[in-house]
Amino acid sequence: MTPPAQTRWPGLAGASPARMTSPVLVGRAPELRWLGGALARVRGGSPAALLIGGGAGAGKTRLVSEFATGYAAAARVLAGRCPDLGQVGMPFAPFIAIVRELARDPDVAGLIRAQGPELLRWLPESPPDRPPAPAGPGWATLSGPGSPAPGIAPRQARARLFVEVLELLEQLARRQPAVLVVEDAHWADESTMDLLSFLIGSQQAMDGVLIVVTYRSDELRRGHPLCALLSRLDRVGWVQRTELAGLSRAESADLAGHLLGAEPAPSLAEHVYRRAGGNPLFVEELVWWQGQHGKAKAASPRDLMLAAVRRLPERTQEVLRTASARGQRTGRRLLAAATGMHAGALDACLRPAIADGVLVADDDACVFRHSLVSEAIHTDLLPCEHTSAHHGFAAALQDAPSLVPAGWAGIEQAEHWQHVHDPARALSSAWQAAAEAGRVLACAEQLALLTRVLEIWPSVSGAERLTGTGHDHVLRQAAEAAEAAGEDQLAAALAAAARNGTDARQTLAAARPAAPGRLLADPVG
């Protein structure tokens, strides 16, 4: 729930959002004191990690943003977000974003390069003295930025990467206390969760670093990967967890007053409180509807979000339906490529959405005012619209990988092609994505993608031609990735299947019959 940023798009210079967030954070004073107290403990030499849960729209991002702003002079805030990118996730996404942002600072870039070779894998450019990364995902032939020295196993290289991140944070904290923020951990990939667990468990070795993690607690159904991590962290003495409760009746009325610029009528305040249940985002939606229509509407907040979208011109709605396939944020050039529109036409389509507060234009990207808006739109898509939207992004990234941050295109393509139900493209993109995951030492994600290749393989004629290798070789690569990820039983089963020519699907089902988790993808039909 961050306030809308100013647009930098020349084509949208006159657009101004009709919907605004409250200039004052309401009802979170105890949580702000809690965050401030944890930072004080860290500055005093004690470790501290805070886990902040809450339902969608509860105000987790706004809370952390207010804290970061209030303590900007006291600590350096390093913030990264986990994107909603399908089954596999984007490997190390929040940490890579943080390291790349730090690398833009001349005073810090040297620290990153001094930590060791593995961290260099996360930088977008290859150092000039190192060869480019290979096309295939094999560990044995892996080269490129920060390649391990000969004889270093992937598991060892990954462990060294974790230590290099720890040492970088420790070096930064020696200059100024640091706050490491990882948002939307309910969408975190397994590698991100592993690194986060390692850093929190090692906080006694790096004075001056406060770690803050936010997540949607209403997403944590039984078996969710984050549940196991939270359970482990609850046993760490310096970890504290809180759940953002809904605003009280008085706080809800106070928020409505700040949004309206005047004290709300008692009947409106009561209606908003009852319909929103104290959820700050939902209060905003209901108050906005009141301001637009002069009356309260007896509808769910999700319905109000969709109603706001359906009031827009049809062409604008079409663009938003496509944008929803990528989540909350999409670059302007990428969205233009996915929709087949030139920049001027795209700006004209987006202008009404920005004026109505459905979108925010920020740093040459369009951003839904909250991820719940994009989720509501995406859930409402017809099957043909769903397929078309993902196809648009997959094709755009295939033609122009530079439309997304370096290293993202292959893995993002694999997720989009998976939704398009094109087995051949899903196979080849997963194979290439596995190479990228391996390059950044994301063992779990490499294994997930290679598993997808094995699942799809029987459905694709000419799979050997598309991948440039044979089925047995893929099995061996998957076995090596499983070993690197600590999946020793699965690694042994896959290696045996490669030797004996056993069916890959039977091997995978037998090795992980009870909890396939994120590794066993649904076959693409």
Image (cartoon, grey):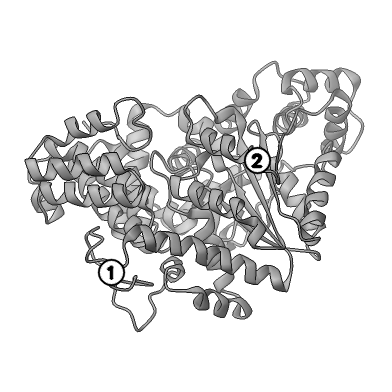
From the top left corner, tell me how far across and down residue 266 is, in percent.
90, 20
Q: Residue furthest bottom?
A: 129
From the top left corner, tell me how far across and down residue 256 is, in percent.
83, 32
Specify the amino acid type for callout 2: Asp
| Lower sequence index among marks 1 and 2 | 1
* Residue pointed to by mark 1: 151
Q: Nearer the viewer, residue 396 or 206?
A: 206
Q: Residue at x 36, y 52 (%)?
A: 443
Judged from the image, the secondary structure of the residue bearing numbered disc 1 is loop
In the drawing, what numbered circle is on residue 96? none
What count of labels does the image hold? 2
* Residue pointed to by mark 2: 356
Q: Residues within 10 Å of mark 1 (few under 14, many from 20)?
A: few
CB atoms of marks 1 and 2 within 8 Å: no
Q: Residue at x 83, y 50 (%)?
A: 37
Specify the amino acid type for callout 1: Gly
From the top left corner, tell me how far across and down residue 223 is, in percent.
47, 27
Q: Is residue 57 above or below residue 17?
A: above
Q: Nearer the viewer, residue 318 or 4?
A: 4
Q: Residue at x 80, y 18 (%)?
A: 271
From the top left corner, tell me how far across and down residue 45 is, in percent.
77, 61
Q: Is residue 278 visible?
A: yes
454 displayed left or right of 63 = left
